[in-house]
Image (tube, rainbow, N blue to C red):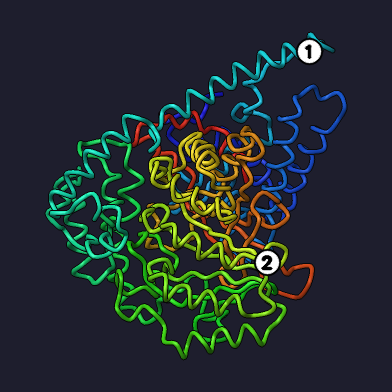
Amino acid sequence: MALPTQTIEYTEEKFRAEAAEFLVIAESASNVEVARERIFEQVSRYQYDMFREDVGLSEGKVIRVRDCARAMRSLLKARSDSFTGFSVARVLFDLGKRNPRPDLQPGFFADLMHIIMGLETRGASEISDYLNISSSLTGRRAALARSNELDRFGKHVEERMQRYAHGLQGEIVAERLMLRDRICRQFGASTEDWNDWRWHLRHVIRDAHPVLSLVHVTKEELEDIRSAREARIPVGITPYYLSLMDCHPSTRDRAIRAQVIPNSEYIEQMKQYRTSKECDLDFMREHDTSPIDLITRRYPGIVIFKPYNTCPQICVYCQRNWEITDVLSEEALASTERIDAALAWIRDHPTIREVLVTGGDPLTLDDDILGEILQKVAAIPSVERIRIGTRTPVTLPMRFTESLAQLFGSLRVPGKREIAVVTHVEHPYEITPDMVTAVDRLRREGIPVYNQLVYTFYVSRRFEAALLRRLLRLAGIDPYYTFNTKGKEETKAYRVPIARLLQEQKEEARILPGLERTDEAVFNVPGLGKNYLRAYQHHDLLSIRPDGSRIYEFHPWEKNIAPQSTYIGEDIPILDYLNRLREIGEDPADYQTIWYYF
């Protein structure tokens, strides 16, 4: 059986060859419901047979059969048909009867074919196949053999990580220092100016500025920036973040550029949204969870408080792209009356013990204004923790002056109140000596720093996110959450199948030392909150669309506490993702187990 490399074409003919047994069952059925029941029984038979003592398969193969059986049974349920408006059982029946199904695309055939192959133990090899340790050895001989195999596997991991450049490498640091000097000359700035965060705010790049000629920005990217500005889509790049881009054509800074330069698909989608009365860009349904202006509440013990709704620069896939009108908008700071009303509301709800101050990026504010707001939050008796959400360690690390670190430290009362910073480092190329210095200033004041990674296409290659976690720990930042990219149509280019995130967690993150993999993989359910992806009982695969998109049902965190509706979400096709990897030089065969994560 060939492995799913880039040379495989997923056609109906190929699917028929791999799914022959199921199609024979469907062909003999008098109607769809009979076919559904008989195929369901056959799936259960496969699983039953695999759990016999004499089956002779590895544990990994047995578990794969279990997982594929669970997924296949879910696809066959009438409930899944009802929830998704599409029937995999009907597809199998039609194919068995040779009824035309022109709607089915290669992504559908690929995914369902691999599930069936997994059921029949014919799928891709397991990651555990890399470790060949004889079960006949015991004691010290077994320990030495295991150690040797771990060395061999560890070398493989190191080689994969070394493929990716990062911002702490000496040659990268030197290149960026030279670029910094060129940017300063372009702006007529001194080193003292560069180290002043306010200078960067005054010189945020909002359009196709001449300074962009100092780095490698393509004609298409320049045109995208112009188009975005014409469409009144916020664009912003701090001079510091510009210095993280490469001067010559390179793939090292792919994630950096994708972070701040909107692509043409995003721009066109956003322009269409502007003219659509049906469109609601509030993907997380913050309107439905905002009991008062500036406050979002999804959980009993914590609220989001948004006194300032803009940033020094805008992430293209920002959750609040519906709310942020421009970079450093003059109207971004809420009035004193609205801020005080929101804080009074928190005071009136003493079950709230934690306040996440975010926006926008509150660290865009001067120390005096920020300090006044934080002091008011700290004065609420029930608040035990103030969490500050900011990307400035990445976009503006010089913002973390000694005075700011001391301000945070002054609010910290051991045993009574904690102050924490939560940031968003997206790629190893963003980690720099300047960031390390900024974080160290906070930690010396007793302020922990955590990272929320959005698992986008641009950090999804093998062991790319693992390297990020490793460097985060060295920089003094604790990995906290890894978010599945939100299912917003305008950010489709950033999205990664849930199966890839699960694969990364099991086959890459799991290999890291424990302190480097403290993050939790989650899906943010609109209006409800975080769904923990590592636990299969929190979500179910319902169906596979004709284009190969998986449809999942996510169960809310309250499901065992109070009645609550589930959320139905559509993923992106695994085959499309693998084809994109191939386009950037990756071998899809390296990701072959992706089909078996649900």
Image location of residue 275, percent across then percent down: 29, 78
Question: How packed is label 2: few (under 14 Cα within 10 Å), some, or many (20 or more)?
Answer: many
Q: Is residue 274 visible?
A: yes
Question: Mark 2–mark 1 contact, CB under 8 Å?
Answer: no
Label 1 SS: helix
Question: Which residue is denoted by mark 2 in the rendering?
Answer: 556
| Residue 411, image quadrant | bottom right
Looking at the picture, which amino acid does disc 2 mark? Pro
Image location of residue 161, percent across then percent down: 47, 29
Q: Could you tell me which residue is drawn at 39 percent across and 53 percent down?
A: 397
Q: Is residue 377 above or below residue 414?
A: below
Question: Which residue is denoted by mark 1 in the rendering?
Answer: 142
Image location of residue 121, percent across then percent down: 68, 30
Q: Which one is nearer the viewer's eye here, 553 or 347?
A: 347
Q: Could you tell me which residue is drawn at 43 percent across and 44 percent down?
A: 427
Q: Please state if 300 lies on the left or on the right of 570 as rendered.
A: right
Which callout, 2 or 1, points to the residue nearer the camera? 1
Q: Could you tell me which residue is drawn at 46 percent across and 78 percent down?
A: 307
Residue reaching furthest to the top: 141
Q: Quadrant of the N terminus?
A: top right
Looking at the picture, which amino acid does disc 1 mark? Ala
Q: Please state if 505 lies on the left or on the right of 184 as rendered.
A: right
The first of marks 2 and 1 along the sequence is 1
Image location of residue 449, percent across then percent down: 55, 53
Query: Disc 2 versus disc 1: distance between alpha carbons?
Result: 45 Å
Q: Could you tell me which residue is drawn at 79 percent across and 39 percent down?
A: 45
Q: Which mark is residue 447?
A: none
| Residue 272, image quadrant | bottom left
Q: Is residue 115 visible?
A: no
Q: Which one is nearer the viewer's eye here, 221 or 449?
A: 449
